[in-house]
Image: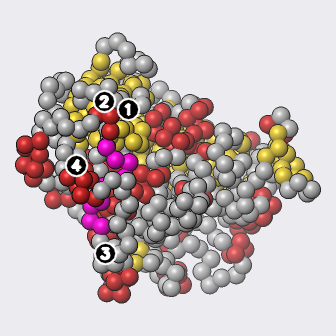
Amino acid sequence: MVSFLILAALAAAGTASFEGNINYDSPSFNHAVLGIDVPKVKARHLEKRDYTGWNTSSLNFTHGVASGDPYPDSVILWTRVSPFVENDASNITVEGTVPLYSHETERYIRASTRPICVDWRVSANRNMSGAVVTTGRAYTTSDIDYTVEAKGLEPFTSYYYQFNVCGAGTSSPIGRTKTAPAEHDETPIGLAVYSCSNYPTGYFNAYGNAARKDNVDYVLHLGDYIYETRAGVLGRDPRASNPPRIIFTLYDYRTRLAQYRTDLDLLLSHQQFPWIPVWDDHEIANNGWRGGYSAMNNTEESFVRAGGISVDQRKMNAVRAYFEWMPIRQASLDDNLRIWRSFKMGKLFDLLMLDTRHYDRSITTLGWNNNYIYNISNEASRTLMGSNQENWFYRQLSESAQRGATWRIIGNQLVFSRINTTSWFGTFENPYNGDQWDGYMANRNRTYQHLFDNNIGNNIMLAGDSHANWVSDLVWFDESDYDPATGAGAVGVEFAGTAVSSTGFGRNISQATNQSRYLVRDNSELQWSEGYYRGYFELQISREKIDASYFGCPTVATRNPFELSLANFTVMAGANHLQRPVAGGTVESGYLQTGGVRQTNLTYNTQTGQYLYTNYSQMWITYPPAT
């Protein structure tokens, strides 16, 4: 793959370089041991530096283009150019995981040592005509699965970019990207927010819908971009997992990422918008913490069951593949594993992207210990993010308020608000989900304490992971009197979104709505809950207010462009709670706190098993089971 960090200072280069491709450094510029040994790569390619033996017709841009992590003067550009659709077979050690190539393995190994030269250029014009804004040239090889990442530009400006095989006519699709605003810019900004795209459970229609409407500037992805699990049978099921197993090796993670990047709506979103992603647990493995995962830990039994791969090796494989395949800046790794970072989006808001899954996280629910986690959930030593990230988080909040940014938008994986699930699931010993912030109450209280002590307002928490929609006022019940009717006593708002395709509350709207009704009843700060639809939400952010619009896909069993407007919310600057009446008093699905209003334009036909949605000119839509 080729990922380029395109520097404004770089002029068009006459010869390619390995330094021009930042994926050799993945995932860190200043920790070479974690990346590729570039001097060794150079030495290996010394005699092939000007290799021209590639049949250029065999080189293809196999997985489109992408961009991400925008700064005012730069953005990451990404593509993959390779003679093979298959991924590089690095460190295949698990029995039965040898990849199936369409050519002889010996020929593959011999060919994979040859570097590929790639040009990139950036233009202000959609068709790449006129003067080139900036350009460059670099090598890519099998060492980084043939990926390329490329920087330099004017603030808050749309640009178009394209990659080409050096000296050949083979070109990538044209991508569009956008830089971040300048430091004091207060121009309104639109964000589309996603999480939890599970390839086997449905098509990624939600990604394409936002791209087709084209109402936002950037995409935020809050994690579970891929799933490490397996489903379906290759060759029989159109969206069966590839590889057809739970993934462990570097080859496995590369191949799974490559499969997801074939979904046409995901490709469209990457081509259309710059992304700001962060991982959840499934980019590596379910319910991650500092010592392992729900189905893997640092024991001899686990090591043997994983085919000789340790917890740390699996994490290294997953992280390396993630940084190769995602348009993301290499983080400064002060220690351990870091993806948490921040973006100044003009004077309008600061975006803080947290890692509440894998960076020094205390033990979470692993199935066998759920009651134990509930019993220790309020211990002061428990942390979702580790002391380094936690202190960084509080400093970022304070610095944002001090510099006068209107909003603080916090992208994290897990639902932050208290969610009592007793009446939803029945009476249990542990009514809270210990894998969310509810299992780390002291960490949440420290966050609230910092906001209260420093009088920091206009806080917007974003969450994914739960496969359901949740909208809450942010309330610290230990310290404030909260009025659900007015929102008084809150310190901000949480917008949590449903999944792109992963399963939700129930198999039908009635069951899902009933669950939402109980949840809203038992959690006074929870103003809206909805768990039937797969989809996403958009934020339109201005100095005066934030408007949040939630969208649901009628079905993800087929690829289609349909969506429903589920609910709309407003937060006024300085209010620190949702505007009343919440959602204007009406939602299309789910359940509201105030009055419990539910309105739907769906009519069920018992004879056909179909719903009639009147907003689509009386078009019949068949709903899928459990997607």
Q: Earlier in the sequence, mark 1 or mark 2?
A: 2
Q: Earlier in the sequence, mark 1 or mark 4?
A: 4
What percent of the width, then of the height, locates residue 226?
47, 57
Q: Which badge, 4 or 2, comes first in the chain's sequence?
A: 4
**Marker disc for residue 48:** none
Mark 1–mark 4 distance (CA, rounded to whole Å): 22 Å
Amino acid type, residue under disc 2 in the picture: Asn
- Residue with the mark numbered 2: 164
Query: Badge 3 is on which residue?
Result: 309
Whole-number angstrom distance, CA of label 3 to CA of label 2: 38 Å
Q: Which residue is mark 4?
A: 111
**Quick one: SS at disc 1?**
loop
The nearer-to-camera label among 4 and 3 is 4
- The answer to whether the residues at label 1 and label 4 have Cβ atoms under 8 Å apart is no
Dots 1, 2 in contact, CB < 8 A: yes
In terms of depth relative to the viewer, which is nearer, 520 or 533? 533
| Label 2 SS | strand
> 416 or 335: which is nearer to us?
335
Residue shown at 29% from the left, 20% from the top: 133
Write the start and end of the magenta stretch as one range: 83-92
Alpha-carbon distance for marks 4 and 2?
20 Å
Left or right: residue 26 compared with residue 413: left
Check the picture and name the quadrant holding the N terminus. Answer: top left
At label 3, the amino acid type is: Ile
Measuring from the top left, give residue 561's x and y in whole percent.
66, 39
3D distance between C-alphas at marks 4 and 3: 28 Å
The amino acid marked with disc number 1 is Ser
Q: Is residue 91 magenta?
A: yes
Q: Which mark is residue 172?
A: 1
Quadrant of the rendered structure where residue 433 is? bottom right
Of tags 3 and 2, which is closer to the observer?
2
Instruction: Tell me: 543 left or right of 308.
Output: right
